[in-house]
Image (spheres, grey):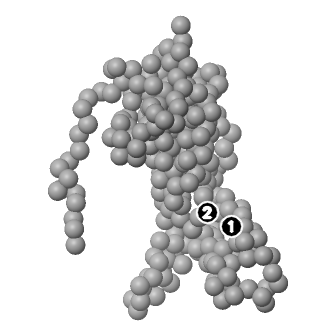
Amino acid sequence: MKVRFGIFNDMEKTVTEAIHYRRSVRIFKSDVELDSTIVKQCIENAVLAPTSSNLQLWEFYHIADRDNLKQMTKACLDQNAAKTAKQMVVVVARKDLWRKRAKANLDFLKSVYGNKPEEEYSGREKFALNYYKKLIPSVYFDFLGIFGWLKYLIFQIIGIFRPTYRQVRQSDMRIVAQKSAGLAAQNFMISMAALGYDTCPMEGSDTLMVKRILGLPSGAEINMVIGCGVRDEKGVYGPRFRVPFNDIYKKM
């Protein structure tokens, strides 16, 4: 008999407890189902993660349908974390949506400022609006990588005389989008752990196959596929290993 695993707020772990509880679980219990509503709530927590310029260049695909899970398992190379997952969440980086997300930020700011005529905006308000009208397009726009290298050279020259932003190539902006998506993924996994659910972030996948299953355009990029379930007693393959803290902690 299958059991639906539900969690209540009074059982929620603290942030520190959730971080320590979270492990990459490779085998999930076969007889325990997840509450899709709770998984969705954890995705809602994911989108509150910090994101570069608040562009939110991400999407989240919540997979609970068995046929889709079967397809995704094949795309994830039939690894155990995929085969036994009750649900999956695919985190997608969408650098290609920068125009749409910049406009959304611009429209939001205008509404916050009262949708005033242009001349009535304060200096601070104009600065914020111009950030999305002028600066973001200047950084994100590119054509076959040519403009990116031109901007890179210009910013390197500026950097000789004063501190400046240097990551302006197309490859740099891809990294920016992927970093933001990774932060959101961590928010999701910690939220799941806080509620007693388990996850396994999987980079081992045929990303082209995943994109086809999800119907994604060429500009979308798979950040990671996250298997979700409740850990089997053999689901964690061993004790947690981290290099000594003093090896990676540098106080200046």
Q: Nearer the viewer, residue 141 or 129?
A: 129
Corner quadrant of residue 208: top right
Residue ranking furthest to the top: 1
Say which amino acid is labelled 2: Leu
Find out whether the residues at labels 1 and 2 contact each other: C-beta distance under 8 Å: yes
Please indicate, yes or no, whether residue 98 appears anywhere in the rendered image: yes
Please indicate, yes or no, whether residue 82 appears anywhere in the rendered image: no
Residue assigned mark 2 = 55
Q: Eyeballing the image, is 236 above or below 194? A: above
From the viewer's perspective, tell me whether residue 163 is left or right of residue 103. left
Q: Where does the image place residue 106, in percent across and percent down from the top left?
A: 71, 71
Q: Label 1 to label 2, Cα distance in Å?
A: 7 Å
Say which amino acid is labelled 1: Asn
Q: Secondary structure at mark 2?
A: loop
- Residue 124 image label: none
Q: Nearer the viewer, residue 117 or 173?
A: 117
Q: Eyeballing the image, is 100 above or below 1? A: below
Residue assigned mark 1 = 105
- For marks 1 and 2 on the same chain, the one whose residue lies earlier in the sequence: 2
Callout 2: 10 Å neighbours few (<14), some, many (20+)? many
Q: Where does the image place residue 214, in percent across and percent down from the top left?
A: 65, 37
Q: Residue at x 41, y 85 (%)?
A: 163
Q: Where does the image place residue 177, in percent across and percent down from the top left?
A: 54, 58
